[in-house]
Amino acid sequence: MSDSRRIVDDQLYCHFVTFSCHRRRALLDEDHAKRILLGHLNAQLNRQSAKCVGFVVMPDHVHVIIWFPKTGQLSRFMQSWKRLSSYAIRNWYRDEQAAYFENIDLGDRFWTPKYYAFEIYSRDKLEEKLVYLHMNPVRAGFVEKCVDWRWSSAKW
């Protein structure tokens, strides 16, 4: 069965993006790995003059809502963010967390090769997707209130 999802990036709207660690491994379980990922998100936002509307980082996947001032930016953004963050997180595990690094299988891929993007056309849909992503840690049982999860934009 082929993956028939198509990424549309020909209008100025927000993109709700989801991507996962390869084989849903909890490679973002460590706080420092999450910091590295968010640091690279911020750097990529600055490079492409994009805005992050909301985000949540879970141990094995990420949701983010991004807006670009020009069309056709999403693919380049995601490719750079995933490539640079995986390289930096792998190096951190290898250099600073050798024992943890030995116990996890980083494999040959850090992220799944693709990502899922949903185009947001209305304020109602934007609010729905923000609630959905902010509630992820609550649904997973990590916190009781979404604002208590450090690795999301729910507080703001």
Image (cartoon, rainbow, N blue to C red):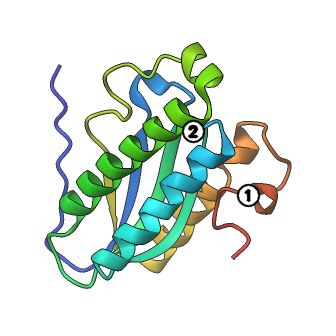
Q: Where is residue 115 in the image (x, y as percent from the top left)?
A: 31, 44
* Horizontal arrangement in the rendering, residue 147 relative to residue 98 (left or right): right
Q: Which residue lies furthest to the right in this view?
A: 144
Which label is found at residue 28?
Answer: 2
Residue at left 82%, top 58%? 148
Q: Position of residue 103 (x, y in %)?
A: 60, 14
Q: Residues within 10 Å of mark 2 (few under 14, many from 20)?
A: many
Asked if residue 116 can be seen in this view, the reply is no
Q: Please, what is the three-letter code of the amino acid marked with disc 1?
A: Arg
Which label is found at residue 150?
Answer: 1
Q: What element carries label 2?
A: loop
* Horizontal arrangement in the rendering, residue 23 relative to residue 133 (left or right): left
Residue at left 47%, top 79%? 123
Q: Is mark 1 on a helix, strand or loop?
A: loop
Residue at left 18%, top 66%? 9
* Horizontal arrangement in the rendering, residue 144 relative to residue 58 (left or right): right
Report which quarter residue 119 is drawn in. Answer: bottom left
Along the polypeptide, which appears first: circle 2 or circle 1?
2
Q: Please state which of residues 129 and 26 is positioned toward the viewer in this rendering.
A: 26
Q: How crowded is mark 1: few (under 14 residues within 10 Å), some or many (20 or more)?
A: some
Q: Position of residue 38 (x, y in %)?
A: 52, 60
**23 up-or-down from 43: above or below:** above
Q: Do the residues labelled 2 and 1 touch (CB within 8 Å)?
A: no
**12 up-or-down from 117: above or below:** below
Report which quarter residue 81 is drawn in. Answer: bottom left
Asked if residue 22 can be seen in this view, the reply is yes
Q: Quadrant where the C terminus lies?
A: bottom right
Q: Please, what is the three-letter code of the amino acid marked with disc 2?
A: Leu
Q: Please state which of residues 119 and 49 is positioned toward the viewer in this rendering.
A: 49
